[in-house]
Image: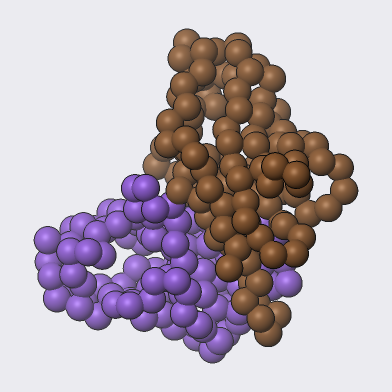
Amino acid sequence: EAQVTQNPRYLITVTGKKLTVTCSQNMNHEYMSWYRQDPGLGLRQIYYSMNVEVTDKGDVPEGYKVSRKEKRNFPLILESPSPNQTSLYFCASSFFGQSTDTQYFGPGTRLTVL
Amino acid sequence: AQSVAQPEDQVNVAEGNPLTVKCTYSVSGNPYLFWYVQYPNRGLQFLLKYITGDNLVKGSYGFEAEFNKSQTSFHLKKPSALVSDSALYFCAVRDFLGFGNEKLTFGTGTRLTIIP
């Protein structure tokens, strides 16, 4: 089954404690992206990657890091989480060149930073 | 930059009635527009898109959307609402970033509630 998986689905942590949210897709997609969803703000792109070892900032990259060492994985790293990063996070993937044709979204990770 | 606006945070419709979820856009050039749906505790799912051609676009689950260039709108519609249509709906526009890269810019979302 074609899918995007994220782990963990729920996470409660404390300020400053480094964390990683994993994202994996099994569709051989070149393009992967991270979004955060906040009430009244919709989805905002954090980082994206057009292929292995190619990443770039989205609209709200501050406080986040990503890496793309393998085509299927695109982890989101919060080196020193802060309460304003409490949000619902989505990973998405698609074929490059059709990067916005049909994006496949993961189920989401709800992060709470205390 | 391209943008979309969803003027209604919440839309309530009685089951069996027609529904409309509104979206307006602001783009330079030809718009590429999308609707996505988010069911509770799930990721977003693609519903339909407008790239070019017919102004009435048909999508999944009986939804359709009407592209109106003069009103810069792309409203989502369904002739007869089902309780299972209750979800969060997002309008989105393709934003070209240069160097062959692009991304989706989303609206703020509209929560659709179908009342039995």
Left or right of B67, for residue A76: left
Q: Position of residue A2 (x, y in %)?
A: 62, 55
The image quarter containing residue A75 is bottom left
- Residue at 34% across, 48% down: A39
Above or below residue B96? Residue B2 is: above
Left or right of B9, for residue A82: left
Q: Position of residue B50 (x, y in %)?
A: 75, 49
Q: Is residue B92 visible?
A: no
Q: Color of chain A here?
A: purple
Q: Who is closer to the viewer here, B32 or A75?
A: B32
- Residue at 53% across, 24% down: B84
Of all chains in the rendering, the one displayed in brown is B
The image quarter containing residue A50 is bottom right
The quadrant the C terminus of chain A occupies is bottom left
Q: Position of residue A24 (x, y in %)?
A: 49, 67
Q: Who is closer to the viewer here, B88 or A14?
A: B88
Q: Is residue A71 visible?
A: yes
